[in-house]
Image (tube, rainbow, N blue to C red):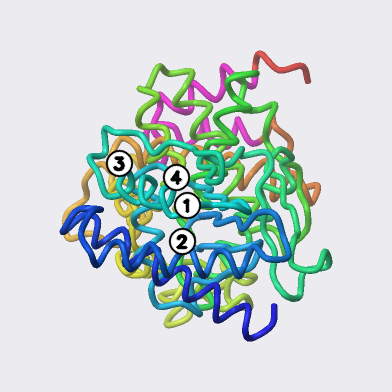
């Protein structure tokens, strides 16, 4: 993208944000709104001079224009993101020939009541993005800034989780919208086949382990919740809680994690304290559901109140925490140790049965046992 084109795109985003705000405050017929629409139409005309459509795509906390992220480079992008999210829009395409009248009606609907849908027009197309086909890209993308990532495959979902966790650990924030898409993709898979054991991903190596652990924990949590009859409306928050449960481990040095069972003293405290780190980090992120904060803090508490973080008085963790903790335990035993040849499904189930009622919730241990008994050995 040339500098002049980048400048034009930023100018169009700025006018788009100003138009939404002005239409909401003063009405679309206000002279100021008319001036904004005139400038916006001019910018779009220049941008569409050599191509037929200019696409705005919202993915998580990032706004893409023609496949290139613009949130960091345009100050008004967050305003457009908030308005698009509020109106349920993930894709807006401006086509060659768009008129000021179309822009006026579009901005009026964006600024209007939320129960009034934003409509597509001959030269403005709006809607949602299919989970299985999401456009991403950047200047360094192998496809020249128009890359495509599909969440239809398990490997691609795990890659998205890995990107989100890596970004959080690196200080670039949490793309909660991307994790929501992964949750939706898992729920779609479970709708076709409700047995979560069928959807667990196999061992993929040490480098992928944090993302794989989070993904498989989410699959098992959502699958058990569905089979137990938990309300489907809670699935989004349940899935996010499972994906984010071990966030604090991202900030524990890899060398300490590798020696976790051998640590003592100050080194052990660094690992034991990671649930507190999880809570602190997630409190600094936007749109994280409260239950995810609770699970991140409690998921190493035992069913009988023992474990860590150490509490002044033992208490039983939240019911959702108990579900996620059972899922985490099985995933670690089955995926990590099973992947490296140290545990079978039978031995994993036996280990959990021994700790039923102390470390783990008996109800979820029984539910897992039933699932495994129904599976061919």
Residue 47 lies in what quarter of the image?
bottom right
Q: Characterize the local packing of mark 1: few (<14), some (14-19) or many (20 or more) Cα atoms within 10 angstroms.
A: some
**Which mark's residue is nearer the viewer, 4 or 1?**
4
Q: Characterize the local packing of mark 2: few (<14), some (14-19) or many (20 or more) Cα atoms within 10 angstroms.
A: some
* Residue 251 location (% of width, % of height): 49, 74
Residue 165 lies in what quarter of the image?
bottom right
The residue depicted at 55 percent of the width and 81 percent of the height is: 7
Count up the numbered dots: 4
Does residue 350 show up magenta in the picture?
Answer: yes
For the question of whether residue 261 can be seen, the reply is: no
Q: Secondary structure at mark 4?
A: loop
Q: Which residue is mark 1?
A: 177
Label 2 and label 4: CA atoms lie apart by 13 Å
Q: Would residue 297 be found to the left or right of residue 324 on screen? A: left
Label 1 and label 3: CA atoms lie apart by 35 Å
**Which mark's residue is nearer the viewer, 1 or 3?**
1
Q: Which residue is mark 3?
A: 304
State which tag comes first along the sequence, 1 or 3: 1
State which tag comes first along the sequence, 4 or 3: 4
Q: Which mark is residue 89?
A: 4
The residue at the far bottom in this view is 3
In the rendered structure, are the residues bearing label 2 and label 3 in contact, judged by CB atoms less than 8 Å apart? no
The residue depicted at 55 percent of the width and 34 percent of the height is: 220
The span picked out in magenta is: 348-372
């Amino acid at each position: 993208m040339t500098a002049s084109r980048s400048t034009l795109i930023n100018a169009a985003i700025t006018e788009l944000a100003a138009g939404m705000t002005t239409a909401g405050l003063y009405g679309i017929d206000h002279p100021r709104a008319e001036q904004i629409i005139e400038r916006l139409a001019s910018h779009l005309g220049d941008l569409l001079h050599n191509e037929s459509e200019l696409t705005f795509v919202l993915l998580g906390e990032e706004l893409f224009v023609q496949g290139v992220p613009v949130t960091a480079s345009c100050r008004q992008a967050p305003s457009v993101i908030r308005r698009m999210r509020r109106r349920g829009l993930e894709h807006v395409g401006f086509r060659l020939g768009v008129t000021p009248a179309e822009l006026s009606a579009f901005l009026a609907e964006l600024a209007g009541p939320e129960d009034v849908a934003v409509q597509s027009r001959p030269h403005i197309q709006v809607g949602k993005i299919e989970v299985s086909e999401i456009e991403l890209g950047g200047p360094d993308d192998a496809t020249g800034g128009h890359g495509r990532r599909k969440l239809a495959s398990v490997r691609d979902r795990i890659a998205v989780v890995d990107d989100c966790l890596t970004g959080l650990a690196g200080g670039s924030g949490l793309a909660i919208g991307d994790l929501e898409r992964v949750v939706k993709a898992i729920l779609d898979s479970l709708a076709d086949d409700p047995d979560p054991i069928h959807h667990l991903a196999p061992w993929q190596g040490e480098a992928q382990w944090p993302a794989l652990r989070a993904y498989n924990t989410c699959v098992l949590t959502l699958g058990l919740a569905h089979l137990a009859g938990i309300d489907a409306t809670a699935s989004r928050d349940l899935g996010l809680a499972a994906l984010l449960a071990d966030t604090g481990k991202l900030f524990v040095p890899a060398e300490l994690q590798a020696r976790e069972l051998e640590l003592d003293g100050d080194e052990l405290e660094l690992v034991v304290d990671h649930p507190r780190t999880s809570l602190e980090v997630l409190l600094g992120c936007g749109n994280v559901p409260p239950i995810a904060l609770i699970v991140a803090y409690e998921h190493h508490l035992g069913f009988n109140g023992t474990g860590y973080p150490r509490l002044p008085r033992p208490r039983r963790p939240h019911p959702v925490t108990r579900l996620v903790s059972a899922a985490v335990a099985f995933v670690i035993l089955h995926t990590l140790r099973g992947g490296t040849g140290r545990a079978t499904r039978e031995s994993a189930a036996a280990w959990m049965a021994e700790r039923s009622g102390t470390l783990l919730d008996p109800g979820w241990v029984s539910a897992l046992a039933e699932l495994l008994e129904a599976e061919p050995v």
